[in-house]
Image: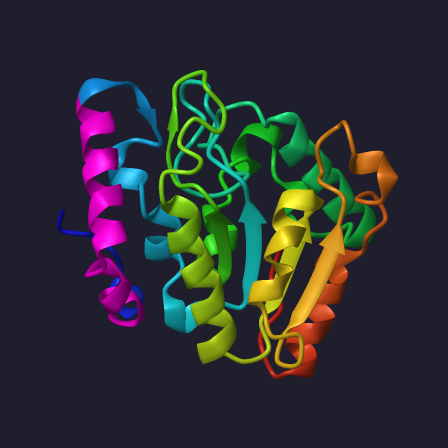
Amino acid sequence: MQVKIEESWKKVLADYFEKEEFKHLAEFVRNEYLNKKVYPPPKDLFRAFNETPFDKVKVVILGQDPYHNPNQAHGLAFSVPKGIPAPPSLLNIFKEICDEISDSPSCKLPGKEKTDLTRWANQGVFLLNAVLTVLKNAPTSHAGKGWEEFTDFVIRTLSDKKQNLVFMLWGAYARSKKALIDEGKHLILEAPHPSPLSANRGFFGCGHFKKANEYLEKHGKKPIEW
């Protein structure tokens, strides 16, 4: 399968795309798209990479797998297309942002205007799901098929080849990726998941968005307009 991905990512991931395990994964994914209802749409499969080139990454937010309901997944973790109601976790993310930075765009934009997080991706926020595809109405259905090995390699590559990134790890699954990141070179921010099941146990009040911007500014990078 010819991988259609942004050039700076293609360069750093080229060797991985030649591995047998990636070729098996690509063949599996291609067959799933041909025979079943899979999200996100094929054109959005590598959208996180295409919207946030490797050279531009400043912040990494890690999700688990795409939304499995119709019209929600579009290749960016936690994000849904403009006009689609915000899922509960995304609503909680906006609530935390507004508590921290009351004049951020996420507080000013109308509800249906702000759900698409492309505006973050274009500023250097890499919205990566650990698994990039899912079957309709079947959460984690493509877990264990090879995506995790690929995205672990992506995380490790970011850690190794870049300096002074902010990694936001929310929930036990995301936090399990901490071992892939060099804490001496990057800022790792950990909290419970923004899901309504856990947000009250420490996601609310975590201060991550403000901390991220302070760290970026300290290292001479433009802060994110959350």
Which residue occupies the foreground of this view, 216 or 152? 152
Q: Position of residue 72 (x, y in %)?
A: 45, 26
The residue depicted at 13 percent of the width and 47 percent of the height is 1
Quarter where residue 135 is shown: top left
Which residue occupies the foreground of this view, 21 or 102? 21
Query: Looking at the magenta stretch, what is its main secondary structure?
Result: helix
Quarter where residue 85 is shown: top right
Does residue 74 appear left or right of residue 214 in this picture?
A: left
Relative height, residue 129 to residue 155 (above, below):
above
Q: Position of residue 177 (x, y in %)?
A: 59, 56
The residue depicted at 70 percent of the width and 74 percent of the height is 215
Relative height, residue 211 to residue 77 (above, below):
below
Q: Is residue 24 magenta?
A: yes
Q: Which residues are magenta?
A: 11-34
| Residue 80 visible in image | yes
Q: Position of residue 73 (x, y in %)?
A: 43, 31
Does residue 127 appear left or right of residue 185 in this picture?
A: left
The residue depicted at 63 percent of the width and 44 percent of the height is 173
> How many circles with numbers are drawn on the protein?
0
Q: How is the image coloured?
A: rainbow
Does residue 61 appear left or right of residue 147 in this picture?
A: right
